Image (cartoon, grey):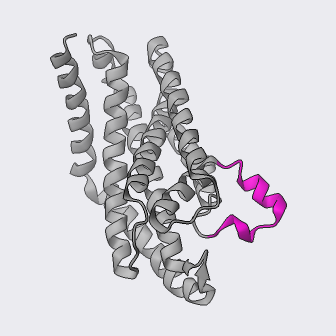
Amino acid sequence: MSPHAILTAFLTIVIREVRRFTRIWPQTMLPPAVTMTLYFIIFGNLIGSRIGQMGGFDYMAFIVPGLIMMSVITSSYANVVSSFFSMKFQRSIEELLVSPVPNGVILAGYVAGGMARGLSIGVIVTLVSQVFTDFQIHSLALVAVTVVLTSALFSLGGFINAMLATKFDDISIVPTFVLTPLTYLGGVFYSIDLLPEFWQGVSMANPILYMINAFRYGFLGVSDVNVYAALGMILVFIVVLSVACLRMLARGKGIRH
């Protein structure tokens, strides 16, 4: 395919993905905003007023970066897993498979669509947080890099889940039993310095902890982990998952029967 044809194929997939989640915005964009508003009210205002400060900052300001990142992670993952599996289920994915579109372009298109939704939700939650607290951004570049890389990583994760899933129930297993526990235990609502030494060590094995803390450092300038190590880990995961996705596409894993 010529570069122009590749670009056209990529943009076609991305535009279709963006139109898909914007067309049903009451189901895709409104619920995260409502959920995060409840978190801000319950954890930030009601509980936060009793906790006081954490990490040298007002508790509400402390949890804002974690809540933004949590919404980005879940939305990026959910968009790709639901969209790609729906195409598998409807057998419309075969149109892509028989086309001359390279596997890398197919993967990039779906990942970009997932990132579009994840980052859009992140912006919405950030705007909602401004109603409850004022905060300064310590490093805008770090905020942008961390949220973009994390959104790409979980879009890739959603793609793998969609390829391996054989029924609709399969696309909810990972978010329910893996993503949600790891996110809640990833330092969204607390600093791991509050934990006993043993549980601090256990928490360090949670990859989402590094993403949330790198993002929090971009906002507040404080982190429980080394920020550069966190960014390096995210990049390694992106490379590994990208290779895995491309190999699965080449083999037709979960697609060709």
What is the quadrant of the N terminus in the image?
Answer: top left
Residue 237 spot, x, y in % from top left: 55, 35
Indicate whether 43 appears above or below 87.
below
Indicate whether 68 appears above or below 178.
below
Residue at x-position 40% and y-position 80%: 133
User: In the rendered structure, does residue 60 fall within the stretch colored magenta?
Assistant: no
Indicate whether 83 appears above or below 242.
below
Residue 14 spot, x, y in % from top left: 25, 35
Q: How many marks?
A: 0
Q: Nearer the viewer, residue 23 or 3?
A: 3
Residue at x-position 84% and y-position 59%: 198
Residue at x-position 36% and y-position 44%: 115
Residue 206 spot, x, y in % from top left: 67, 49
Residue 185 spot, x, y in % from top left: 65, 59
Q: In which quarter of the image is residue 20?
A: top left
Most extreme residue toward the bottom is: 50
Q: Is residue 218 left or right of residue 192?
A: left
Numbered range of the magenta stretch: 190-206
Q: Is residue 91 visible?
A: no
Residue at x-position 39% and y-position 62%: 32
Q: Is residue 108 visible?
A: yes
Q: Is residue 249 left or right of residue 50?
A: left
Q: In which quarter of the image is residue 81?
A: top left
User: In the rendered structure, does residue 192 fall within the stretch colored magenta?
Assistant: yes
Q: In which quarter of the image is residue 183?
A: bottom right
Q: Is residue 157 left or right of residue 191?
A: left
